[in-house]
Image (tube, rainbow, N blue to C red):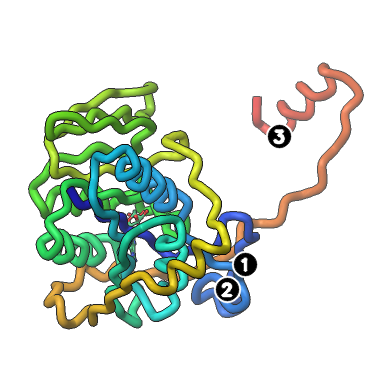
C-alpha cells in the first residue's frame, strides 16, 4: 500500500505573524517557513505505519511555487520515499487543492491519504473533506489515533463533544489532529540522504485542474492593540470592575 501525505508550506508556528503595511497579506519575506504542523503529524503517522510493515511507500506532495521543495525535502529527510511538487505561482484555495490532490490520487492510487485537519495560515479545515467527496471515498477527520487492519482503518476522531471512533474502508482520507503523535526530529545524515531521493515536479496546468471558486480577500489587519492590565486589590473589586465593563 502507498500512503500519500499532503504537506503545505506555511509560516512557522513559532513566528509572530506580521501584516504587510499595505494590508495585502502577511509578511513572508525573511520569515521562517515550515511544514504545516498538522501535515508533519500526518507524515509521521504514515512513516510509523510503514515502519510497522503496513505500507510499502510514503509519498509527500505539495502544491505551490518552487519554494515548497524545501518542505518536501524536509519530508523526505523525515523518511518519505519520494516527493511530488505540483508547481504553480498562484495561491491556491481548498477546492483547487482538493481537485489537484485528486489528480495525484488517480495517478498514484494510494490506500490512504493523510492531510492536516487545517492549514495554520488560512485555517480553512476544508481540503481533506473536499478530497474525500471528490474521490468518493470515506473520510475520518481530526484523528488522534489510527489503526489499520483487514483493509479498514479504525480512527479515533476529536469532535466537539469528545472522541468518536470511526471505522472506514480503505482507501480513505484521514485528517490529523495534534494528539495523534509527536513528529520525529530530522537528523543531519537524513538531510543529506534526502537530497538523493526522487522529487518529481508537475506543472499545475498539465493536470487540467478546474480552478475552484475564487474567494476574494478584502484586506488583512492586525488585531487591535491590547490595553494595559489593571491590578485589583480584592475579589470584590475584580467583580466590580467586570460589572463596570459589562462583562458580568
Ligand atoms: P485547509 O483546508 O486549507 O485548512 O488545509 C487542510 C490540509 O490540506 C492541510 O493541512 C494540507 O494537508 C492540505 N493542503 C492545503 N493546501 C495545500 C497545498 N498547497 N499543498 C499541499 N497540501 C495542502
Q: Say if 221 sits above or below 174 in the image.
A: below
Give the distance between the C-alpha atoms of the residues marked 2 and 1, in whole angstroms: 6 Å
Q: What element carries label 3?
A: loop
Q: Does the residue labelled 1 lie within 8 Å of ligand 1?
A: no
Residue closest to the eye, 154 or 238: 154
- Around disc 3, counting alpha carbons within 10 Å, would you say few (fewer than 14), some (14 to 19), or many (20 or more)? few
- Does the residue at mark 3 contact the one at mark 2 (Cβ under 8 Å)? no
Q: What element carries label 1?
A: loop
Residue closest to the eye, 108 or 51: 51
Q: Where is residue 210 in the image (x, y as percent from the top left)?
A: 14, 72
Q: Where is residue 229 in the image (x, y as percent from the top left)?
A: 82, 41
Q: Where is residue 89 in the image (x, y as percent from the top left)?
A: 35, 82
Residue tagged 1: 18
Residue at the image point whose x is 54% and y is 74% from the top: 23
The circle drawn on residue 27 is 2
The circle drawn on residue 245 is 3
Q: Where is residue 152 in the image (x, y as percent from the top left)?
A: 15, 32
What is the count of numbered marks? 3
Give the distance between the C-alpha atoms of the residues marked 1 and 3, in whole angstroms: 30 Å
Residue at the image point whose x is 45% and y is 56% from the top: 78
Residue 88 in which image quadrant = bottom left
- Around disc 1, counting alpha carbons within 10 Å, would you say few (fewer than 14), some (14 to 19), or many (20 or more)? some
Mark found first going from the N terminus, 3 or 2: 2
Residue 158 in which image quadrant = top left
Give the distance between the C-alpha atoms of the residues marked 3 and 2, in whole angstroms: 35 Å
Amino acid at each position: 500500500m502507498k500512503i500519500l501525505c499532503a504537506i503545505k508550506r506555511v509560516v512557522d508556528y513559532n513566528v509572530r505573524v506580521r501584516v504587510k503595511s499595505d494590508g495585502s497579506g502577511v509578511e513572508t519575506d525573511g520569515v521562517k517557513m515550515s511544514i504545516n504542523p498538522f501535515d508533519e503529524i500526518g507524515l509521521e503517522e504514515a512513516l510509523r505505519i510503514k515502519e510497522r510493515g503496513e505500507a510499502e511507500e510514503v509519498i509527500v506532495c505539495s502544491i505551490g511555487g518552487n519554494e515548497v521543495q524545501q518542505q518536501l525535502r524536509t519530508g523526505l529527510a523525515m523518511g518519505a520515499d519520494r516527493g511530488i511538487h505540483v508547481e504553480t505561482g498562484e495561491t491556491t484555495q481548498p477546492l483547487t487543492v482538493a481537485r489537484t490532490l485528486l489528480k495525484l490520487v488517480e495517478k498514484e492510487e494510494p490506500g490512504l491519504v493523510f492531510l492536516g485537519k487545517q492549514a495554520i495560515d488560512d485555517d480553512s479545515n476544508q481540503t481533506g473533506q473536499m478530497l474525500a467527496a471528490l474521490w468518493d471515498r470515506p473520510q475520518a477527520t481530526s484523528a488522534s489515533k489510527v489503526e489499520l487492519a483487514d483493509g479498514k482503518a479504525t480512527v479515533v476522531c476529536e469532535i466537539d463533544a469528545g472522541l468518536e471512533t470511526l471505522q472506514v474502508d480503505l482507501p480513505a482520507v484521514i485528517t490529523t489532529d495534534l494528539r495523534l503523535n509527536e513528529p520525529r526530529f530530522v537528523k543531519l545524515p537524513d538531510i543529506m540522504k534526502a537530497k538523493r531521493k526522487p522529487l518529481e515536479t508537475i506543472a499545475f496546468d498539465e493536470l487540467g485542474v478546474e480552478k475552484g471558486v475564487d474567494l476574494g480577500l478584502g484586506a488583512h489587519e492586525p488585531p487591535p492593540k491590547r490595553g494595559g492590565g489593571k491590578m485589583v486589590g480584592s475579589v470584590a473589586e475584580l467583580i466590580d470592575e467586570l460589572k463596570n465593563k459589562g462583562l458580568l
